[in-house]
Amino acid sequence: MIEIRGVSKIFQEEKAVDNISLTVHKGAIYGLLGSNGAGKTTLLKTLAGIYRPEAGSVKLAGQPVYESPEVKRRMIFMPDSPYFFAQATIKSMAAFYRSIYPGWSQKRYEELRTMFRLDTRRKLSRFSKGMQRQAAVWLALSCKPDVLIMDEPIDGLDPVMRRQIKNLLFQEVAERELTVLISSHNLREIEDLCDHVGIMHEGRMLVEKDLDDLKADTHKIQVAFRDERHAAALDAKLQILHREQRGSVSLYIVKGDRERISQAFHVYEPYVFDLLPLTLEEIFIYEMGDAGYDAQPIIL
Amino acid sequence: MFELDVRSRKPIYEQLTDKVKEMIMHGILRADEQLPSVRTLSSQLTVNPNTIQKAYRELEREGYIYSQQGKGNFVAPLQQGQNESKRAELKEELLRLMAEAVYLGFTESEMSALYRQALDKRREENSHD
């Protein structure tokens, strides 16, 4: 549904996005993660057709996005801080969206009213941050877009609303194959929400994968060897991202197939061997460390 | 009908497949019984529908369930041999537990008593059917 090919965006000599390619299939929920200043927002704004890329192509269902109103009618971009017109109320914003988006569904708008319980006649500027966020989601879903792009959407929402909105998104995905692209720093939320993730750093894409595959591909291992010399022999056989010694127990982060790794360790008949799947947060930190972005050098 | 542990490190789709297999093996889900739809389960559990779809596909691939176009997913009748992978997995787990039990001084007769206990429990469950 979304196809980004070799896109670069330069702001005065500075490459904010550097040769990025990304594919999001119809009906997928894609999570875009990254370090601060990695270029996530720039990439999302380029995808939304707000920025013109210096190189590469951005397509939605095969059509270029930039300066194409027909394509943009099918998508909604929710910026990191919701934008409403001065003096606007939900009612007046709804009228505006209705005039712009041909897919606007008054029925959906009314259905969602019962869920959000916001005063449609009150000025949006007087709403709290979380309430403004709710209003933005309400308006966006009423437009029945094919693609929803959300920059940091969870910010400021209470746990009940977060769950409600998550459920709403899942419903849209299950019923009419809505495609969602989300950027966030809240890895815990992304983990529950997305099926695909991409991790960005300094304008480039480090990894892009099915979330479950990513988790099945990286493992945390706690091991106690009978003989310390065995540890050195493993380096050649496995792709080790990280190693740490905690007393007689070593902690490894290893990439690769679970069975193969397990066998490689079992050759040495360790006293203790525990293989655990990683959390997304751990994957993020170790991948970043691999790219040279970590808090401290690894001491072997 | 399913409870997931969102704090667990185990991927959600694996938790789902394990749960369904367990329910089939214990006879909680009967042959040809319909499983909840992807949509229903997604909103009940607040889980990504694509993840549920993936779990159902995996279960179908392993022969635990079958799908009917436009109708949904159903429990496949249990076949011998289908449990091969589960058996291998269980064997390993048992061996690990037994090694621990041997270390703690369990005797052979104590262990066979446990086996009989499990057998009785299973018979009792079946008699309620």
Image: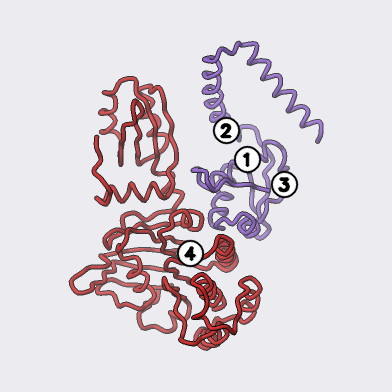
Chain colours: A red, B purple
Position of residue A143 measured from the top left corner of the image (x, y, whole percent): 54, 78
* Pointer 1 chain: B
Image quadrant where one finds the N terminus of chain A: bottom left
Image quadrant where one finds the C terminus of chain A: top left
Asked if marks 4 and 3 touch (Cβ < 8 Å), the reply is no
Q: Residue B86 carries which label?
A: 2
Q: How crowded is mark 1: few (under 14 residues within 10 Å), some or many (20 or more)?
A: some
Residues at marks 1 and 3, common chain?
A: yes
Q: Is residue A273 above or below residue A88?
A: above
Q: What residue type is labelled 1?
A: Lys
Q: Residue B32 carries which label?
A: 3
Q: Give how far apart the Cα atoms at labels 1 and 3 are.
A: 14 Å
Residues at marks 4 and 3, common chain?
A: no
Q: Name the side, left or right, on which A299 lies relative to B63.
A: left
* Pointer 4 chain: A
Position of residue A83 measured from the top left corner of the image (x, y, whole percent): 44, 79
Can residue A145 be seen from the camera position used here? no
Q: Nearer the viewer, residue A279 or A236?
A: A279
Q: How crowded is mark 3: few (under 14 residues within 10 Å), some or many (20 or more)?
A: few
Residues at marks 4 and 2, common chain?
A: no
Local SS, label 1 = helix
Q: Residue B21 carries which label?
A: 1
Residues at marks 2 and 3, common chain?
A: yes
Q: Which amino acid does label 4 sit on?
A: Ile
